[in-house]
Image (cartoon, helix red, strand yellow):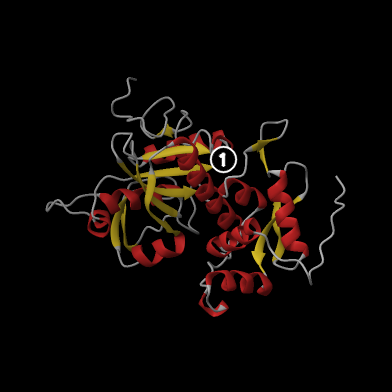
Amino acid sequence: MVRKKTIDPETYTPTRQGLEILQTICDYGGMTRLQLSILLNYTLTYNKERRLVVEPYCRELIQDLSEAGYLDTVKRPFVNTQGKNAFFHKLTSKGKKAVADKRGCRVSQLRCSPVDSNLEHFVLVNDFRVILLRSISDTLPGAELHATFDGRTLSQMHSKDKMTIEMPALPPRWREKHYEHNVSIIPDFYFHLVDPNHRPNHSRRFVEMDRGTETIKSSRDYDDWAKKIVKYQHYWKEGSDGKSLFGELYGYHAVAVLSVTMSEKRMHNLKEATERVGGNHRFWFTTYDRLTPTNFFTEPIWVVASKPGWYSYFDNPLEKKE
């Protein structure tokens, strides 16, 4: 569709909805049009293939802001299903000035979130965050997020918790068990959900966004999936005094890990790799295409390590009949 509307950068002033978009991008560092459309409660819009697409009015607002010089459009290395490059948006200096004026501060005081150097991973984590927030808003009346921590914050929090882990024998890389020292676990995201209408009322989850870059086979070059699982298990394992590193930092003991990956085959492979090192019902898995604002909490889109079948978010896999 050809755009007939033209924007004069000299005279254009962002609308209330436009300023909301600018402030949201400042808070997240950078966002795609679809992320903005989902997070800012525009009508969920689907194409013929039942994939979420940007709501038309939100799309027009973003284009207005871009043409008026408030937004930079950054090309991503990712190519979509139509073979076209994907994009995301950051604030220009003009956009930052508009947000600073709205908030009554200087541009230097904005503290907009930075964009991670691993751009695609950064985008996927923001995908999860906006879907989580929209899901709570649309499907969990009365629920709220008590806390969220992004990867940068978690790195600062967890880097002090150094561990010695025991890796089991995993041929051919590790033919016998061994110990690794001075290691830590840095999740991609964490949230603490409080929902008075479900039991338990509090659910705390670490999040792992997997793009298929972490091997499930042997590799001497970087932490593989199995080692990450062992780290998690050690992080929340209680000692003889009843304490754990997780409990000491967060004040609670109950936590699980949600992993989101690219395909169903990859999902089942990660589940199997998790089980191979003793991972249990605390490790949950789904795929990107299953994770939507309408089914995050309500549909059985999750598989659970050491358990058969599919689960909804509030299911207890220890109680579900096998």
The residue type indicated by label 1 comes to Tyr
**Residue topped by disc 1:** 288
Q: Is residue 33 visible?
A: yes
Image quadrant for the N terminus?
A: top right
Residue 165 located left or right of residue 288: left
Q: Quadrant of residue 321?
A: top left
In percent of width and height, residue 27 lies at 53, 63
In percent of width and height, residue 49 lies at 70, 31
- Residue furthest to the left in view is 241
Q: Which residue occupies the foreground of this view, 211 or 75?
A: 75
Q: Which residue occupies the foreground of this view, 182 or 252?
A: 252
Q: How many other residues sit within 10 Å of disc 1, few (<14), some (14-19) or many (≥20)?
A: some
Point 63% across, 58% down: residue? 16
- Residue furthest to the top in view is 321
> From the viewer's perspective, is residue 246 above or below residue 278?
below
Point 37% across, 33% down: residue? 314
Residue 160 located left or right of residue 101: left
> From the viewer's perspective, is residue 149 above or below residue 320?
below
Q: Secondary structure at mark 1?
A: helix
